[in-house]
Image (tube, rainbow, N blue to C red):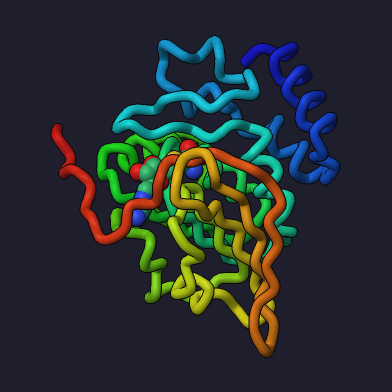
Amino acid sequence: MTESGVIRLLMELRGQGVTDMRVQNVFEAIPRDRFVPEDLVDQAWDNVALPIGCGQTISQPIVVALMTQKLALSERMRVLEIGTGSGYQAAILSRLVRRVYTVERHADLLVTAQKRFDALKLHNITTLKADGSRGWPQQAPFDRIIVTAAAARMPEHLLDQLTPDGIMVVPVGEGTWDQKLYCVQRHEDGYDSEAFLDVRFVPLLEGREGRPVER
Ligand code: SAH
């Protein structure tokens, strides 16, 4: 990793509202260059989304940072992520909470992400190949849920897998151009939700299986 690249990215994140020091520190601690394809390593510290294969992308750092900050995490929490992709967001979360559960429908992406977790000794991440639109009922409830693919509508059944005062961050929108990031907070008698950012995520594909691993 290039020192100047990290510093430039951190300044950009701060300038765009990432004020939480724990989030800033974890961006320094997790090497994003280990989560992108080899031929794109020179762009790993740029504030851009990059292709990771299977038609998917590693999210833009500012979006990862703002979603992470919005989750208001603490050390004892158990967090569910839908859409492992490269594994970068899960790795960021793993340094801030007790355990991360992450679900991905593409087996080959999941295998690569798992290798990265092992190499970086991130041992508090549990992975599952499944349709994450159904959450992970066997491990529920979760203190926090983060969805990193865009749902066409607010995924109500994922809300059921939150603890009573849990928070979910999720991009919602039908097309590529009209998605918003929502922060949903569960209360005793219902939910509050707030849209806080315009975003562009790949779609959350419901009820479909990914391709089998080819090795
Ligand atoms: N969090 C990732 C970025 C994810 S891109 C990172 O840090 O790199 C979105 C991911 O969601 C893709 O890998 C896609 O395959 C996955 N995805 C889409 N629909 C899904 C579903 N129903 N269940 C699980 N994963 C899904």
> Which quadrant is the N terminus positioned in?
top right
Q: From what the image shows, is residue 29 above or below residue 173?
A: above
Q: Is residue 87 visible?
A: no
Q: Nearer the viewer, residue 82 or 178?
A: 178
Total count of labels: 0
Q: Tell me residue 83's x, y (percent).
A: 42, 49
Figure quadrant of the C terminus:
top left
Q: Position of residue 58 (x, y in %)?
A: 48, 33
- Asked if residue 92 lies left or right of residue 131, the reply is right
Q: Does the rendering let one see residue 115?
A: yes
Q: Quadrant of residue 53?
A: top left
For the point 60% across and 50% down, which residue is it? 180
Residue 77 is situated, as x and y percent measured from the top left of the image, at 64, 66
Q: Residue at x 40, y 46 (%)?
A: 203
Decide which of 114, 102 is in the foreground and name it: 102
Residue furthest bottom in the image: 189
Left or right: where 106 falls relative to 127: left
Horizontal and vertical percent for residue 96? 67, 52
Corner quadrant of residue 26: top right
- Residue 48 higher or lower than 174, as above or below: above
In the image, residue 58 sits, relative to residue 66, either above or below, namely above
Q: Residue at x 29, y 58 (%)?
A: 130
Residue at coordinates 66% horizontally, 48% vertically from top-left?
Answer: 67
